[in-house]
Every structure is written in C-alpha cells, then in structure tokens.
Image (spheres, rainbow, N blue to C red):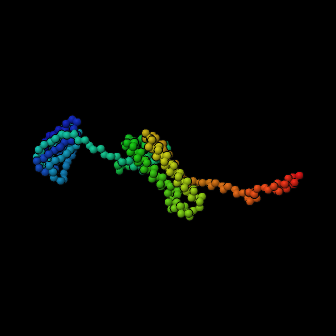
C-alpha cells in the first residue's frame, strides 16, 4: 500500500500508524526515491524525521493514520577532553568531542563546543600534565625515600620546594582558566612546570663564640691591659 502524506510547515516528523504490526515501512520522496526504510521488529507505529514537504509512505500493511508533528530533539550533552596542547604560532589543540577526534586551533574548538566545556577539559588536562611531569622529574618512590629519612636534609628540602613549585604553577593556571572569557586567552596559557629539581640553599649556621670571647674581662685583666699599653 502507498499513500501520499504531508509534513506541515514548522513540523519535522511524521508519525505513521498501521492497522496491524508490520516489518516493512518506507518513506519515499515525491519522485519515488526511498529516503528512509524501516525493517525489523514488527510494530504498528513508525516515526520518520524529515523537513516539511510532500512524501509517500509505502508498506505491506494498511495505513490507519499519519500525523505531522513537531519533535523537539533532546540536547546532547557535549563532553570535551583535551588530549594535547601546544603553544606558539604552529600550536594548537587535540581534543575529543563526545568521542570524536578534533585537531585545530583553540578558536576553532570554541566553534564546536561551549567555552565552559573547553575550560573544564583544560582543567583536567593540566592536572594530568602536572602529575605526569612531576612524576618524570621526581618519582613518587623518590619522594617516599625523602620522607622516610633515607635522603639528606638538604635533598628533602629541595624535593619539598619542587613539589610546592608544581602546586604554585597549577594553582595559577586554574585561576587563569576559570577567569578566561575567550578562546584566545586559553590559547595563550603557559604550562611552565619545573623542568629540574628546585635548588635550595641552606642558611649558614650562626658562628658560635669561643669560651674566651664569651668570658667578660675582669678588673685585674683591665689593669694589666692598661699597663701593657703604657
């Protein structure tokens, strides 16, 4: 059976109701070209999303009713995951948008995803980068040696200063990303994590006075020193 149907202006979907369950229903254009074909589990109701216009429904069964209607598509949440980030004229960003790979500039990424989503992805990315780069420079095992007292005091101080430097840079980047109002600002970020262990100079211990220097001069000593001067 074939039947001419219409999707009204401002509508975007056609509902087809059959008299009994069918496994084949097709939507054709006005030239008889198949646009959508539905095969599979038998059912009485089929939905076809199309723009307004005239179409033809073809089926093995009997069509009871066709309804032109508006279907408001559910908004698909967008997830942005930053996979790579490079600065400079040749720089750009590699990202995953809902599982699809993107490679281009930060400005181009902003055309495909909301700025807040990009910022969320960047916050995760820089956190991962901080952990990876710190681990390469100062492995966790080495930090444990320092805490357990296996390393010298000055070495432990250098380790502590290095970790604090990573935290300082990470905190600064977090603030910059959260305050950013454009992709241009995000593209100018500098991931300047430490590339070497921070050197720490130990303060020299105060010189201890000798017992002679500490002992006050007595009156006899003063008289003796005066006679020697005469």
**Image quadrant in which you'd find residue 8:** top left
Q: Residue furthest front?
A: 219
Q: Quadrant of the N terminus?
A: top left
Of residue 134 and residue 172, the one placed in the foreground of this image is: 172
Q: Residue at x 87, y 54 (%)?
A: 227
Q: Residue at x 55, y 57 (%)?
A: 159
Of residue 213 and residue 26, the one placed in the foreground of this image is: 213
Q: Residue at x 14, y 45 (%)?
A: 17
Name the side, left or right, on which 125 lies relative to 58: right
Q: Residue furthest right?
A: 230
Would residue 142 be visible to someone looking at this image?
no
The total number of labels drawn is 0
Name the side, left or right, on which 20 lies relative to 187: left
Q: Residue at x 47, y 52 (%)?
A: 129
Of residue 65 and residue 28, the one placed in the foreground of this image is: 65
Instruction: Pinpoint residue 119: horizontal percent, then vertical percent.
Output: 41, 45
Instruction: Pinpoint residue 81: horizontal percent, then vertical percent.
Output: 39, 49
Would residue 166 be visible to someone looking at this image?
yes
Instruction: Pinpoint residue 85: horizontal percent, then vertical percent.
Output: 45, 48
Instruction: Pinpoint residue 10: horizontal percent, then vertical percent.
Output: 23, 36
Relative to 197, residue 14 above or below: above
Q: Residue furthest top?
A: 9
Name the side, left or right, on which 97 lies relative to 219: left
Relative to 133, residue 5 above or below: above
């Amino acid at each position: 059976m074939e039947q001419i149907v219409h999707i009204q202006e401002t509508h975007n979907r056609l509902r087809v109701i059959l008299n009994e369950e069918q496994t084949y229903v097709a939507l054709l254009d006005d030239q008889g070209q198949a646009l959508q074909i539905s095969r599979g589990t038998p059912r009485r109701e089929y939905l076809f999303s199309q723009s307004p216009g005239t179409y033809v429904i073809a089926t093995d069964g009997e069509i009871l009713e066709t309804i032109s209607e508006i279907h408001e598509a559910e908004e698909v949440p967008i997830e942005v995951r930053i996979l790579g980030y490079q600065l400079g004229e040749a720089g750009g960003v590699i990202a995953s948008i809902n599982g699809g790979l993107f490679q281009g500039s930060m400005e181009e990424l902003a055309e495909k995803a909301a700025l807040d989503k990009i910022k969320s992805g960047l916050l995760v990315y820089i956190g991962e980068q901080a952990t990876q780069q710190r681990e390469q420079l100062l492995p966790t095992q080495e930090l444990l040696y320092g805490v357990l007292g296996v390393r010298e005091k000055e070495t432990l101080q250098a380790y502590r200063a290095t970790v604090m430097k990573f935290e300082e840079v990470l905190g600064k980047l977090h603030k910059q990303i959260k305050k950013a109002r454009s992709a241009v600002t995000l593209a100018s970020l500098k991931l300047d994590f430490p590339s070497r262990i921070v050197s720490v100079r130990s303060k020299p211990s105060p010189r201890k006075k000798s017992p002679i220097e500490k002992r006050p001069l007595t009156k006899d000593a003063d008289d003796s020193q005066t006679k020697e001067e005469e």
